[in-house]
Image (spheres, rainbow, N blue to C red):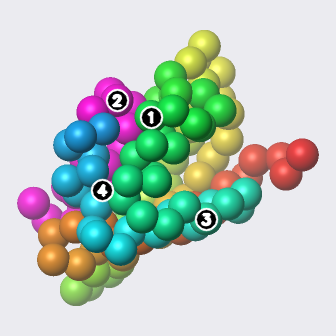
């Protein structure tokens, strides 16, 4: 699976709650940096997605996926929608991909910090 496909699959798996398969896409030392927290480790990230995020019924609508020439760095731009279909916030996620696994994600959003 190439990097762009891997990133698109990441969002699909989160939205469809396929957490075991999501775990397989992540590198062993996976880190997710968000404006409100950092999550270290694959298991902690999957647990957060499954049990602790504010709305587990969201949908990611991707507008564009950008790939660096060597394919190790990928950025995805989109909008996150709440379970009721309303727009929650826009985002850009910056991915580092190594050995066909996602090693890290850094999230930037236009969400209100309050």
Residue 39 percent across, percent down from the top left: 54, 61
> Relative to 13, does residue 57 appear above or below in the rendering?
above
The circle on residue 38 is: 3
Upstream in the sequence, badge 1 or badge 4?
Answer: 4
Q: Residue at x 16, y 69 (%)?
A: 100
- The part of the image, by quadrant, that contains residue 76 is bottom left
Q: CA distance from mark 4 to mark 3?
A: 19 Å
Left or right: 86 in relation to 45? right
Disc 2 marks which residue? 17
Give the labeled residue for mark 4: 7
> What residue span does the magenta drawing correspond to?
1-18
In the structure shown, which secondary structural element does the residue marked by tag 4 occupy?
helix
Label 3 SS: strand
Q: Nearer the viewer, residue 108 or 46?
A: 46
Q: Earlier in the sequence, mark 3 or mark 1?
A: 3
Distance CA(mark 2)–CA(mark 1): 7 Å
Residue 72 in picture, x, y percent from top left = 28, 80
Spatial separation of the CA atoms under disc 4 and disc 2: 15 Å
Instruction: Left or right? Give the position of 57 relative to 37.
Output: left
Mark 1 and mark 4: Cα distance apart in space: 18 Å
Q: Of discs 1 and 4, which sits in the foreground? A: 1
Count neighbours of disc 3 (C-alpha within 10 A) and say few if under 14, some if 14 to 19, many if 20 or more.
few
Q: Earlier in the sequence, mark 4 or mark 2?
A: 4
Name which of mark 4 and mark 3 comes first in the sequence: 4
* Structural crowding at the residue carrying mark 1, measured as other residues with C-alpha within 10 Å and reported as few (<14), some (14–19) or many (≥20): some
């Amino acid at each position: 699976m190439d990097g762009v496909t891997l990133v698109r699959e990441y969002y699909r798996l989160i939205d469809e709650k396929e957490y075991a398969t999501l775990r397989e896409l992540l590198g062993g030392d996976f880190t997710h940096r968000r404006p409100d927290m950092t999550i270290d480790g694959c298991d902690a990230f999957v647990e957060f997605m499954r049990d602790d995020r504010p709305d587990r019924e969201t949908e990611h609508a991707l507008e564009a996926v950008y790939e660096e020439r060597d394919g190790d760095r990928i950025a995805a731009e989109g909008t996150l929608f709440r379970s009721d279909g309303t727009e929650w916030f826009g985002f850009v996620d910056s991915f580092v991909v190594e050995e066909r696994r996602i090693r890290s994600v850094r999230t930037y959003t236009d969400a209100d910090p309050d």
